Image (cartoon, helix red, strand yellow):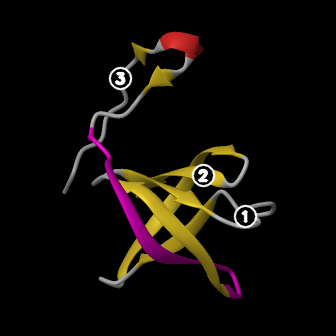
Amino acid sequence: MFHCFLTGTAYPGGMQERRTAQRHRTFKGGSISFDRFAGIECVVRNLSDCGACIELDCPGSLPQDFSLIIRPENIRRSCHLVWRADQRLGVRFG
């Protein structure tokens, strides 16, 4: 099991880095599912043991919790939405 604790390192512009697990840039296909909706396509932009940044064409009404399938490995992870900015979302696995 991985433990992902938040830290409080400040960056220019007021943003705070709150990850302890380093994220690695990636460009993988993904699919989001929740309730009865399945197969909302996305791109996984970065990934760590604790979370990811994903990009969607239309992120408008996603719930706070959903499942993410990361391809080509077909890894399924439960996600909790942490932040959103335009078409990108930050999620925590759990």
Between 40 and 82, the one lying in front of the other is 40
Q: Are marks 3 and 2 in contact (CB under 8 Å)?
A: no
Mark 1 crowd level (few <14, some 14–19, many ≥20, 10 Å Cα): few
Q: Residue at x 54, y 20 (%)?
A: 15
Considering only order in the chain, which callout, 2 or 1, is on the residue closer to the N terminus? 1
Q: Is residue 87 above or below residue 72?
A: above
Quadrant in the picture for the C terminus? bottom left
Q: Which mark is residue 62?
A: 1
Per the image, the residue denoted by label 3 is 7
Mark 2 crowd level (few <14, some 14–19, many ≥20, 10 Å Cα): some
What's the residue type where badge 3 is placed? Answer: Thr
Between 50 and 10, the one lying in front of the other is 10
Q: Residue 56: x and y, percent?
A: 65, 65
Per the image, the residue denoted by label 2 is 89
Q: Which residues are magenta?
A: 21-37
Residue 31 shown in magenta: yes
